Amino acid sequence: MAERTLRGARLGGQSFEDERGIEFAARQQVGYRCERGHEFEITMSVEAEVPATWECPRCGAPSLSTSGIKPEEKAEKPARTHWDMLLERRSEKELEDILKERLELLRGGEIGPAHLHRASARKKKAG
């Protein structure tokens, strides 16, 4: 078996086919510049949609196209807070009523931490 292998050939090595008679797809060079000033070109098909940004091969920073293609601006939604979500379910008037009701129950000793219930129960027995 060793005598039938090509000398100098290795697994995954170069192809022994030549490029004669092969017609390559039309290509274009697209230039990019990163924020650190690195400039580079990427070879792409003429039919390909050219992206506005590309990762810099030297530093990994996002690079903008030098041909003037601008990245699409995505509309960002403002962050929803807990208060915003609460107001989706209840009105401020309802929240004020619930607050008053809960404060009355807390002050009356009907709800709240257990140590407060025990203290108010002892006062009632003593009094």
Image: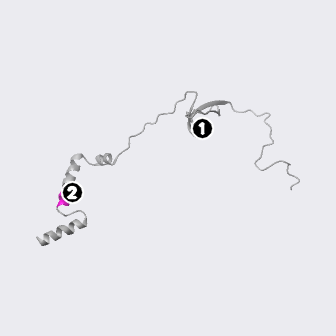
Residue 126 spot, x, y in % from top left? 12, 72
Residue 64 in sight:
yes
Residue found at x 86% / y 55%: 2
Lower position in the chain sequence, tag 2 or tag 1? 1
Residue shown at the point (21%, 57%) measured from the top left: 102
> What is the residue that sits farthest to the bottom in this orientation?
125
- Which amino acid lies under the numbered mark 2 shown in the image of this protein? Arg
Residue found at x 76% / y 34%: 22
Res 46 seen here? no
Looking at the rendered structure, the kind of residue marked 1 is Cys
* Mark 2 or 1, closer to the camera: 1
Looking at the rendering, in which quadrant would you find the N terminus?
Answer: bottom right
According to the image, label 2 marks what residue? 102
Q: Which of 16 and 81 is in front in this view?
A: 81
Magenta-highlighted residues: 101-107
Tally the numbered discs: 2
Q: Residue furthest top?
A: 68
Residue 10 lies within the magenta run: no
